[in-house]
Image: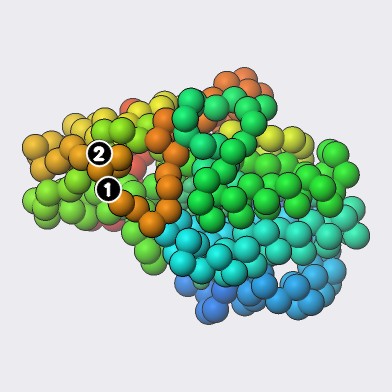
Amino acid sequence: MRILVTGANGLVAGRLLPLLASKGHEVIGLGRGPQRAPGGTYLSMDLGDAQKLSSAVQELRPQVIINCAAMTDVDGCERDPLGAYTANVEGVATLARSARELGSHLLHVSTDYVFDGDAGPYDIDAIPNPRGTYAITKHAGEEAARALLPKGSWTIARTAVVYGWPSTGKNNFGSWLIDALSNGKNVKLFTDQWVSPTHASNAAEMLAELAERRLAGIWHTSGADVVDRVAFGRALCARFGFDSSLIQPSRMADVNLPSPRPAKSGLNVSRTSEALSAKPLSLEAALARLYAEYKGSTS
Ligand SMILES: NC(=O)c1ccc[n+]([C@@H]2O[C@H](COP(=O)([O-])OP(=O)(O)OC[C@H]3O[C@@H](n4cnc5c(N)ncnc54)[C@H](OP(=O)(O)O)[C@@H]3O)[C@@H](O)[C@H]2O)c1
């Protein structure tokens, strides 16, 4: 299949592009600025340039578009709502219009932040109630895909707290912890934020299967376990042999963050576990993979 993947320089697409290529698909990565992840056909484009983006998609005629691009800096979105709206809503709408014209399938990657985090973990049919600019724009992106494409031609795949080693340019939750803990530095982690941490390569595997099978509707593509951030940090210490006393528990409720975060979040992945061959990994299995990635890069 010919598959266009946006956000090519990002964490998830950086894993997804080589995976799809290894499965024999013709893949084109679309990223902003110069290509930073190695290999493959690459186009440089800003999702805000609707004309250029739709012309490129019309010319490429992908059977599936996987939209991994987004403005993901949660506090940055609060400071720059126009940038957030352009990337997280208008970009999706342009891709959805183009997919509609071509009769292609759009797989749009979204987030657990569409939920308020008052009563997680959330089922796929739970009612979103986004708080903060990142969350509101990501939810509006989901709605753009649903509104502009016929049922059966769109997939929304929500993921959460994605981590992997090595990082792609900027640190992720896992690579930041490894960097700090391996250097004996203390880290402050929240005890009152529950999440479904997701190993990046595992997310890529689930997304690849959704794309290949063009499975429509809403899917939760996160890790299988819901944990608070301290529990994640301690599990990582146990696997990596780091000193867990470097973890200093703190409370999100005591910190004045520019953008609100869901507190009791987490995604119910039972439908994904049942339907896909690429299963959401348990935290233990995911950390074993992270450790193998880390050891592979340091040995
Ligand atoms: N990472 C997480 O913890 C997490 C959690 C839940 C959901 N998600 C979702 O998962 C998807 C993939 O996230 P990720 O972790 O791979 O994020 P990422 O590493 O930040 O990658 C996103 C990519 O999108 C690109 N981008 C942003 N604005 C753009 C624009 N206007 N035009 C073109 N490209 C633009 C960025 O380009 P630059 O590199 O130039 O900035 C970046 O390479 C996103 O939809 C995100 O909302 C991620």
Q: Residues within 10 Å of mark 2 (few under 14, many from 20)?
A: few
Does the beta carbon of the residue at mark 2 sit less than 8 Å from ligand 1? no
Vertical placement of 89 versus 198: above or below?
below
Mark yes or no: residue 231 visible: yes
Q: How far apart are marks 1 and 2 (CA)?
A: 7 Å
CB under 8 Å between callouts 1 and 2?
yes
**Residue 264: which numbered mark, if any?**
none
- Residue 46 drawn above or below residue 73: below
Q: Is mark 1 within 8 Å of ligand 1?
A: no
Q: Quickly name the residue at label 2.
A: 251
Estimate the x, y position of residue 43 in percent, counting from the top left.
65, 74
For the rendered model, the colour scheme is rainbow
Q: Is mark 1 on a helix, strand or loop?
A: loop
Residue 119, given in percent of the width and then of the height, sits at 48, 25
- Residue 11 appears in view: no
Mark 2 lies on a secondary structure that is: loop
Q: Image point 47% across, 30% down: which residue?
A: 118
The answer to whether residue 171 is left or right of residue 267 is: left
Q: Which residue is drawn at 54% across and 78% down?
A: 33
Q: Quick check: 95 left or right of 241?
A: right
Coordinates of residue 175 in the picture (x, y in percent): 30, 52
At label 1, the amino acid type is Val
Count of number-bearing discs: 2
Q: x, y (%) of residue 103? A: 89, 53
Q: Residue visible at 27% across and 48% down?
A: 255
Q: In the image shown, does 62 or 227 lie closer to the viewer?
A: 227
Sort mark 1 into few (<14), some (14-19) or many (20+) by Cα contacts within 10 Å: few
Amino acid at the residue labelled 2: Arg
Q: Which mark is residue 255?
A: 1
In the displayed structure image, the side of residue 160 where residue 149 appears, left or right: right
Residue 73 found in image quarter = bottom left
Q: Which residue is drawn at 52% across and 46% down?
A: 131
